[in-house]
Image (cartoon, grey):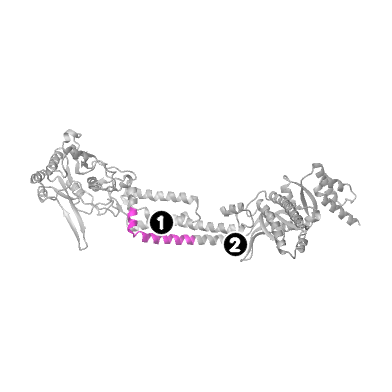
Amino acid sequence: MRTQEKARQARQTGSRQLRLLVLSLTTLVAISFLSRLPAWSLLELRSFDYLSTVDDPRPPPGGPVIVAIDEPSLADINAQWPWPRSLHAELIRQLRAAGARVIGLDIIMAEPSNPDNDAAITKAVGPDVVLAGDETLIETPQASQLIRATPLPQLTEAGAVTGIASIDLSGDGIFRRIPGYEDGFAAMLAKVAGVAPEVLPAGTLIQSFGPARSYPTVSYYQALDPKGLLPPDFFKDRVVLVGLSLQNAPAIDKGGVDAFATPYTVHTGKLVSGVEIQATIYDNIRRGLSIAEARLPTVAACILISVLLAATTVWRSTGWLTVVTSAAALLAFAAVSAAGIRLAHVFVSPLGPTVAYISVVFGQAAFDFAEERRNKRQITRAFAQYISPDLVKRLSNDPSQLKLGGERRTLSVLFSDVRGFTTIAETLKDDPEQLTGLINRLLTPLSDVVMDHGGTIDKYMGDCIMAFWNAPLDDPDHALHAVRASLAMQAAISRLNGELEREAAELGRKPHILKMGVGINTGECIVGNMGSTRRFDYSCLGDSVNLASRLEGASKNYGVALLLGEETARLVANTYTVVELDRIIVKGRTVPSPVFTVVHKTDAEALAAHQAFIETKYAATLVPSDPVFDRLSADIPELANYYAIVRDALTEGGE
């Protein structure tokens, strides 16, 4: 049996591991296809947004200063936008006088304005000034046209440097990448500032530094009078960027003038001004902080490792520990990705490994859950008619308590049989419906009693019931429960007899009075699924089972309703009063077996007298005329029939 069980478990394990292998390979193929979808790339970028900002990085020291064209400035200057270029010229002079190293105007001056104002700005600019340009791709059904707007020629002739301030947005409208312009606005700022910028490939991911207004920012009107309105040397040796920057960053759903969503927008819901974005690009170039995306072989290797980890997690089983391990693994993927961003400036998306891990782990968990549900249904179908619903529920919730295929257990086995039922059946042979109804009315309450006391119904044999305790679930008090069930069965028979007598009286006929004998024996048995490959039952067999059956048959020979084997009597002796009746040799056995029964209304003196009676009986010194028969029949009326049978046997033997 153990070899068969091991072989069955090995087949189940092999099947499960094969399924896990197929699931892992399927996951790898599925992710390979999914990663080609645009939506997948956007999800990876969204994970980048969170991971690159989770530690809330701030602008590095020595970075740009923002001069904001904001609401206070619009109110203070009290002029219609766009302001006259002569005002910008005055700003340039004030910033230069305050010690600014480079001045970047994120303002497009591609069209002529008032000649005097154009002359003023032309006179003010120089090699330390970077003016914004713009590049726009216009697509029509006929053609695609790239239009570049650059500052007025006289401004560049006066020494001003042109920098393209256009930026590229991802498919979800978020700014994340270094613009692909060699003459980009931030790149030209770095060049004019004398910074040796790191050469960054176009499309490299950018490191954001906080939400809107994270850079040192002053209002435009303050920068027009730095000596009077700002701390000393506020602009000294600094790169100064001038541009639109609203005091309160607009919400993303309302849009804004020269304002864009950045990775920080996922936290704040606010847009960031274009001039701050240029400052961010400048710091990425200046400090080499941009982030490269991992190449395909690296990503594929990470996904493969994730699948292997997932397969290892669920290799043997899934359970609550799987959830804990999975949560730790997913956090580890995110942490490793965040560490790659911060320490190596490389972004390895956790999306692929995360989806791969979840797919394998929860896919296998789903298979295991379905297998468990199937096992529960099988257990329920197999045992629902043999044991109580509570025991079925316990088995289905914890199938490990069940060992199918046969095992050696100590059981308490019960056989019950109705006395004289053959005569009743003969009487009702012409009324099979009444006979069937009587059998059902008999077996239903008896079966309920067995299951209510935790027993397992093995089989029905006509009017006979075979049941046992301590399998399939452990029951430390199996003998006690079996005896209690037998007494409850006798009570159920009495109630049924009362019903039958009332019904017979109403119909004016003789009632069928039912009497039952029960035999219970406790001993080692083999229990498990037994039968053929096409049909089997959960049953038990062994010498102890045979003895229980013989005890049931012998009970009528002793005039008692219940006959117990020696081990059963020993196990229930602390709860019930058990008395020995005889030592018998049952068919198939050579060793005499003492048999017992349960009595209720008696005292210690009567029990001592009964024990002396038994010893005299064994010594073969009893005589029919001994007054002990009458005395014990009066003291222990439950055994009156037994004493009468013993006396009759002695009388017949004497004759």
Query: Residue sitting at 84 percent across and 53 percent down?
Result: 645
Q: Are marks 2 and 1 in contact (CB under 8 Å)?
A: no
Q: Amino acid at mark 1?
A: Ala
Q: Tag 2, which secondary structure? A: helix
- Find disc 2 in the rendering and name its residue: 4
On screen, residue 18 versus residue 465, left or right, reads left
Quadrant into which the C terminus falls? bottom right
Q: Tag 1, which secondary structure? A: helix
Examine the image and state in which quarter residue 461 appears: bottom right
Query: Residue sitting at 41 percent across and 59 percent down?
Result: 27
Residue 567 visible within the image: no
- Find disc 1 in the rendering and name its residue: 356
Pick the residue in front: 518 or 23: 518
> Is 310 drawn above or below residue 62 in the view shown?
below
Residue 515 image position (x, y, % from top left): 76, 55
Q: Which residues are magenta?
A: 17-44
Q: Amino acid at mark 2?
A: Gln
